Amino acid sequence: MSKQLFELMAEKEIQTSNFLPTKKEIENNGRLFAKQILSHGEIDKYELFSQAERLTTATANIRDEIKSHLPKEKHSFFGIEVSPVNGRTMIQFNEDYIWSELKEKMQQREELLKVALKSDESIYDSEGIEVPKVSVKYASDSLQVKY
């Protein structure tokens, strides 16, 4: 199956290799390609997804390995620009006693807010102030992939 998917992808690449597609065009072509394969119904969608996931992992590792061998300077090639980026500065706030103490208090407050949210009764903090029931937001649903 992965050979079939690879051949289909290679065929699609041949059809679009006469020009350098933009990132948006690549994304759109990928979606269209997937829809076309799914609409034909020749390949099981679960098999197709698992093979696409494996190819994604393989190509990401290939990309990362090649990227590690590129010079650390700005280059443009085949419609792609690669620029070096300095590592970000990470301030070590936890070395400050006051900051660490405040962070610990915030973590304790978060736990108290969680308890208040789940409780049917009013909850009070150590100073006798009622802990409010704060609102909740939900992240969008997704599918987790493991193998």
Image (tube, rainbow, N blue to C red):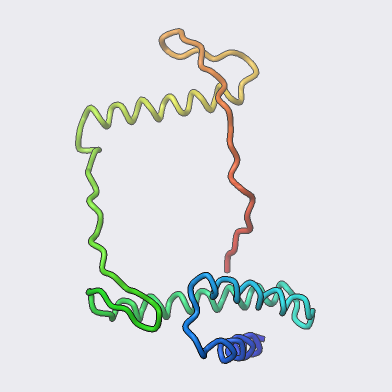
Where is residue 52? Give x, y as percent: 60, 76
Front residue (pair 100, 19): 19
> Please, which residue is most extreme toward the top here?
128
- Which residue is pictured at 54% across the width and 74% down the height? 25
Classify residue 42 as left or right of residue 146.
right
Give the number of callouts. Answer: 0
As displayed, is residue 101 above or below residue 75?
above
Front residue (pair 29, 103): 29
- Which residue is pictured at 45% across the width and 7% down the height? 128
Classify residue 123 as left or right of residue 101.
right
**The C terminus: image quadrant:** bottom right
As displayed, is residue 133 above or below residue 92?
above
Quarter assignment of residue 101: top left
Where is residue 119? Give x, y as percent: 61, 21
- Which residue is pictured at 20% across the width and 38% down the height? 95
- Which residue is pictured at 54% across the width and 15% down the height? 123
**The N terminus: image quadrant:** bottom right
As displayed, is residue 36 above or below residue 1?
above
Where is residue 42? Give x, y as percent: 78, 83
> Please, which residue is most extreme toward the right here?
41
As displayed, is residue 46 above or below residue 94?
below
> Please, which residue is most extreme toward the left here?
96
Where is residue 99? Give x, y as percent: 25, 30
